[in-house]
Image (tube, helix red, strand yellow):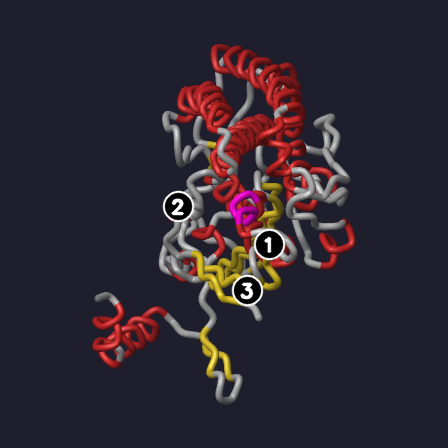
Amino acid sequence: MSVKIPIGPIHPMLKEPINFTFYVEGETIVDAEPNIGFVHRGIEKLTENKTWFQNLYLLEKVCGICSSSHQGCYAQGAEMIFEANVPEKALYIRTLMWELERLHSHLLWLGVIMHEIGFDTLFMYTWRDREAVMDLVEMISGRRVGYSINTIGGVRRDIDYRMLSKALDVANFIASRAEFYERVVLRERTILDRTDGVGVLSKVDAIRLNTVGPTARASGVKRDIRYNLPYAIYDETPFDIVTDDGCDVLSRIIVRIREMIVSAEIIKWIVFNMPKNGPIAAKITHFTKPPENEAISRVEAPRGELFYYIKSNGSLKPERVKIRTPTLANIVSVIHMVKGHYIADIPPIVAGIDPCMSCMDRVAIIDVRNDKKSLFNHDQLVRYAIKWYKKNYRWLREERR
């Protein structure tokens, strides 16, 4: 007979609110169910009430770690709608920021998963080394989080020789540190015991469950938007997709560490090949109206494929912005990976996909009695929320006691 164990939405293992229900027999997990939606912020709906340029600064707040990926993916889609020709130098700067963000994200994640398995020494090392990347993005953009570097038609800030020199130093430093991390991970018994053979996701299952990013590549799936559907200057940039066939948490660690080395090589290539002069943005103003059009934009965010659908009705505001994040694609695989493992294996397995709940959460309004779906505008949504709150006030008060 199985026993239900709820974990979340508040739990030391979880960095953001999500609820899992695990069904266990003894210490072994036999099934699991996710319950999402605790940090839905309605950002997609907000985009419909803001101008094309205002949305640049809204959408970078979808995720603090992947802010440039979200802002750049939206800008890239908007440029398709505006039919803008982005200057070459702007594409170099945009790509440089994306790869610095990948280094920042992977270093942060590596520290988090080391903390989850109880190896805090490497957690301290990676977060210390991450400061070199953060200092560089602050030098380029003026900010450590939410860089606001992208705009529709290019980038907002140019880059000079001093910044390129610093980027070269950071790339060399992180590459050498990544080699050190890999040696530690492959030799340290504490890490191997908690990750080797844990959370296995076969290549067949990774494809079947539509897994993306390092989680898929750690199962031998050669899938990377930078390679499969090149954008910006990735069709010119020499790099290899990092894959591993271990299919477990250890493989996910190794893939991300090796991706740091690849990102460092891309950054070095950008430093040596970036155009010295030229414009950094096309001439599109806040009052430029786009044609009626729609676009799909995809980038390889640190966690995996980031997908934006954008529709224009010819006004100063987009008619629709739809976002599909990597965590939404990968959360199903967690349920598959935990089965057959112990309760103590839950933290590294969940952390292994590098989940971001605030990126993932969406709301769909469905009447389960007749399977009817509803599409609300802003005013209807406000009225519905007030009506629901009045109806459920007493129940909410009892729940919070």
Q: Which residues are magenta?
A: 344-348
Q: Is residue 98 magenta?
A: no
Tell me the amino acid under the disc marked 1: Val
Q: Are marks 3 and 1 in contact (CB under 8 Å)?
A: no
- Secondary structure at badge 1 equals helix
| Residue 39 position within the rendered picture, expressed as x and y whole percent measured from the top left | 38, 57
Residue 222, above or below 210? above
Residue 25: quadrant of the picture? bottom right
| Residue 380 position within the rendered picture, expressed as x and y whole percent measured from the top left | 33, 75
Q: Are marks 2 and 3 in contact (CB under 8 Å)?
A: no
Q: Nearer the viewer, mark 2 or mark 3?
A: 3
The residue at 27%/70% (across/down) is 399
Residue assigned mark 3: 23
Furthest-bottom residue in view? 370
- Quarter of the picture containing the N terminus is bottom right
Residue assigned mark 1: 334
